Image: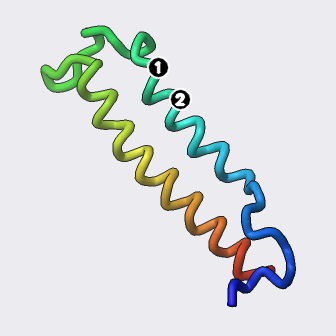
Amino acid sequence: MNGNNGTNGNAWHWSYWLLILVCLVTFFVPFYNRIEPTLFGFPFFYWFQLGWILVSMIVTAFAYYITEQHEKSR
């Protein structure tokens, strides 16, 4: 019982592009490999990565819920 009604369960959803974007920004270290601007004494390199943890969590949850709703509506 896969609930796909005869359709391919591996369909590409637009929200997956958000996940790819997060991965690309995370792995492009030269973009954020610098000290300035600092935030509460922390160099940009560290607080940018910590900020992306929060952003990644939100984007992943959003993509999950959007694709789940899409799968349930099939």
Q: Which residue is mark 1?
A: 28
Q: Residue at x 33, y 12 (%)?
A: 33
Label annotation for residue 1: none
Q: Quadrant of the N terminus?
A: bottom right
Depth check, front residue: 71 or 43: 71
Residue 66 versus residue 50 in the image, above or below: below
Q: Residue at x 59, y 58 (%)?
A: 63
Q: Which residue is mark 2?
A: 24
Badge 2: few (under 14), some or many (20 or more) residues near its Cα, within 10 Å? few
Q: Quadrant of the C terminus?
A: bottom right
Residue 37 versus residue 2 in the image, above or below: above
Q: Residue 68 appears at what percent x and percent y?
A: 63, 73
Location of residue 38 (image quadrant):
top left
Three-letter amino acid code of the residue under disc 1: Phe
Q: Residue at x 43, y 44 (%)?
A: 55
Determine the secondary structure under disc 2: helix
Q: Residue at x 64, y 65 (%)?
A: 66
Location of residue 29 (image quadrant):
top left
Residue 41 versus residue 57 in the image, above or below: above
Going by the picture, which residue comes out furthest to the bottom? 1
Going by the picture, which residue comes out furthest to the right? 6
Given contact means CB atoms under 8 Å apart, are the residues at marks 2 and 1 in contact? Answer: yes
